[in-house]
Image (spheres, rainbow, N blue to C red):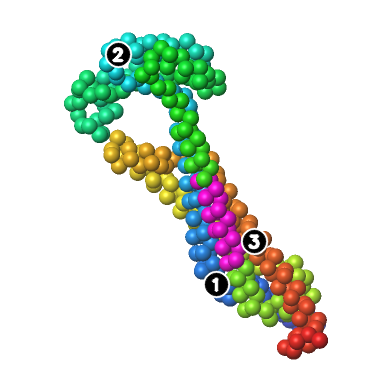
């Protein structure tokens, strides 16, 4: 009987012991979230991610608009004929168009009539303008092949010989300015991205060092019981990875929503003065799937950069701790001999 009672007692005591062991066994993270100001760091990463994604989207939008303008300008050239005494303007316009179409690479030619010319001048001279009362130049718009443009020098010379009052504008100056503007904007955007990423790296370094200062005893105990530096670094790395993913995700989503809202506002106000002026200055606010893919890539890069920075900082700090522990003079606060 005594043996059976002992066996029963052992059976009932074993689960209780396991329960006690499970209660004693630590289940919390090695890096407590309360010891690291995660919310503040997450807010900083979210703001920097928002600025970086906003800059990337703006650069993409400006480049797309500049390419559209460049393509439109490169597809057309303009022949301008100034009125002069004794000049038959209609005949001169037709002769200029026919001469331009004789060159290889010139596709079509369109003479702007009086009504179209008057509409071009309406913003400055008002409605009801009579073109015949003013010495207004007339235009011939020639569409050209972008891949095989005509010889503009020869065309300009032939036009001058036939019609001295003519002037050929191939818009090369405007194209060069647009290319320079796009390149400058891209450089400025790249500089802003570098500054934002640099500020984020410094922020993560200071936050990691602050976390290690607050949890120095944890690191020392883990080292004392034999934990490797890579294990401790991985725990901090996981902690900062979660923070960076949440912050970068919030900033990236906010920037994508900002571009969607701007695109919706522009689409809802088509053919209005505000939309026309905005479209003329900044182009379309639609960044396309490539822009959104770039925003997603920026989010991943920021998260990866934050994680790598945290790991490198932790490993370097742990090495410093090991050096202090190996030097008794430095551990006592004395200068090294």
Judged by its main secondary structure, the magenta piece is helix
Please tell me whether mark 2 sits on a helix, a strand or a loop. loop
Bin the neighbour count of mark 3 within 10 Å (Cα to Cα): few under 14, some 14-19, many 20 and up. many
How far apart marks 2 and 3 lie (CA) works out to 75 Å
Bin the neighbour count of mark 1 within 10 Å (Cα to Cα): few under 14, some 14-19, many 20 and up. few
Picture coordinates of residue 188 (x, y %)? 52, 50
Is residue 200 rendered magenta in the image? yes
Q: Which residue position holds label 3?
A: 307
Picture coordinates of residue 234 (x, y %)? 70, 65
Residue 228, compared with residue 134, is above or below; it is below
Of mark 2 and mark 3, the one earlier in the sequence is: 2
- Say left or right for 45 vs 228: left
Quadrant holding the N terminus: bottom right
Q: Look at the image and give the residue range highlighted in magenta.
A: 185-203
Quadrant holding the C terminus: bottom right
> Which of the numbered marks, if any, corresponds to residue 324?
none
Please tell me whether mark 1 sits on a helix, a strand or a loop. loop
Q: Which residue position holds label 2?
A: 87
């Amino acid at each position: 009987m005594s043996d059976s009672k002992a066996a029963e007692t052992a059976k009932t005591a074993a689960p209780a012991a396991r329960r006690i062991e499970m209660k004693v066994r630590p289940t919390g993270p090695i890096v407590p979230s309360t010891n690291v100001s995660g919310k503040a760091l997450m807010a900083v990463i979210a703001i920097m991610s928002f600025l970086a994604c906003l800059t990337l989207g703006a650069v993409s939008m400006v480049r797309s608009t500049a390419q559209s303008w460049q393509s439109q300008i490169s597809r057309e050239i303009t022949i301008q004929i100034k009125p002069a005494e004794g000049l038959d303007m209609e005949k001169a316009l037709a002769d200029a168009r026919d001469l331009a179409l004789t060159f290889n690479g010139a596709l079509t030619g369109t003479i702007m009539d009086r009504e179209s010319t008057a509409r071009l001048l309406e913003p400055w001279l008002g409605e009801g303008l009579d073109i015949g009362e003013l010495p207004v130049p007339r235009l011939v718009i020639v569409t050209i092949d972008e891949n095989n443009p005509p010889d503009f020098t020869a065309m300009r010379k032939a036009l001058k010989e036939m019609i001295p009052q003519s002037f050929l504008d191939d818009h090369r100056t405007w194209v060069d300015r647009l290319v320079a503007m796009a390149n400058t904007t891209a450089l400025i955007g790249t500089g802003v991205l570098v500054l934002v990423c640099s500020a984020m790296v410094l922020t993560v370094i200071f936050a990691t060092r602050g976390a290690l200062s607050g949890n120095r005893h944890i690191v020392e105990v883990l080292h004392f019981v034999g934990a490797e530096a890579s294990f401790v670094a991985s725990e901090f790395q996981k902690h900062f990875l979660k923070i960076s993913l949440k912050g970068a995700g919030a900033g990236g989503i906010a920037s994508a929503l900002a571009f969607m809202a701007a695109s919706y506002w522009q689409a809802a106000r088509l053919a209005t003065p505000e939309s026309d002026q905005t479209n003329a200055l900044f182009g379309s606010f639609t960044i396309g799937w490539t822009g959104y893919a770039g925003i997603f890539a920026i989010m991943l890069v920021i998260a990866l950069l934050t994680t790598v920075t945290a790991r490198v900082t932790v490993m370097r700090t742990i090495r410093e701790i090991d050096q202090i522990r190996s030097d008794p003079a430095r551990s006592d606060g004395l200068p090294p001999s």
